[in-house]
Image (cartoon, grey):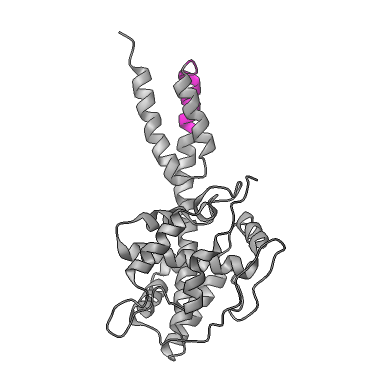
Amino acid sequence: MSTMPKFAMQIFSQVRQDQVHLTMKNPDGSFMATQDLIDELAKSLLASKFYTDPWLVGCVPESVLFEKVIDGLKSEDPLERRKSVNLAYNAEFRIIKMGVEPFIEWCRNGRDPLEIVESANDEPSIQRGFNLIPNVKYTSHSRLSTETRTAIEKVNANSKLFLEMPESLRERFSKANEDIKSSQLSEEFGELLLEIFEQWRLGRKQIIDLSKLIPEAIDQREEMLTNYSYSAVAVAHTAKLVAYITNPKMLTKLLKEGIAIQMKLAIPDA
């Protein structure tokens, strides 16, 4: 495994200390956390090698944050930046509660989003060599917002997607639906459920994308090695295909580049 960067947990330390909610709104419709704060957090996250560098060798993805989350931090859409910062906030919470080494093992085991940290009121898991922030109590349970309720109901109404979920996730959504009807679902749990769903959806999309891209990459690699093994450019390109075989975004880019290389090599020299 490549060298692990230092865990930059100070990024969200002030947020936790002040108990700032990153996605909830005030009665007037404005967000509780200012956009300036969100943008400052996004900038800090992008500068953090721990969160964005591909140091988790052998994991998918090889960075702590998902590629879509990293892209969202760079987005010009403020809502997309806020959503991505919030997902990073939850990633940090998991790391603190699990401890860094168990978190790495969790990543290696496939990042099961249903493996939830049980309680936000327990003392953080302390791993030797890592200084964690003091425990913070989370006692507020806000009334479910219309936005969160609508999102959960929308997921429940998508029968095709609902059936594709792991059974445990389906059960959580079914229970949330019952709690909505009895006015028992809090905003905090509703948001957590949607974030778990988003992580599962991202993983599902990556699998779908790779199931199409990997065969194309294998075909392109074989064709280039068969027809253009004399070309250093072609051989170097086939090496890149192998290196990024589990990265949908890079693989898509490389396949396009490969087509351009093949077209150029197919043109006979004048």
**On screen, 200 above or below 54?**
below
Q: Which quarter of the rendered picture does the N terminus lie within? A: top right
For residue 221: magenta? yes
Q: Magenta: predominant secondary structure element? A: helix
**On screen, 219 above or below 210?**
above
The magenta region covers 219-230
Residue 265: x percent and y percent?
Answer: 38, 19
- In the picture, measured across the screen, residue 209 lies left or right of residue 123, that is left
Give the farthest residue toward the top: 270
Q: Give the number of callouts.
A: 0
Front in this rendered view, residue 17 or 234: 17
- In the picture, measured across the screen, residue 197 lies left or right of residue 76, that is right
Q: Residue at x 46, y 80 (%)?
A: 188
Give the farthest residue toward the bottom: 182
Q: Residue at x 41, y 41 (%)?
A: 252
**On screen, 246 above or below 64?**
above
Q: Residue at x 60, y 72 (%)?
A: 117
Q: Is residue 16 visible?
A: yes
Q: Which quarter of the rendered picture does the C terminus lie within? A: top left
For residue 31: magenta? no
Query: Which quadrant would residue 37 be assigned to in this image?
Result: bottom left
Residue 251: x percent and y percent?
Answer: 45, 40
Front in this rendered view, residue 266 or 143: 143
Residue 148: x percent and y percent?
Answer: 38, 77
Residue 170: x percent and y percent?
Answer: 51, 72
**On screen, 218 above or below 89?**
above
Q: Residue at x 55, y 54 (%)?
A: 50
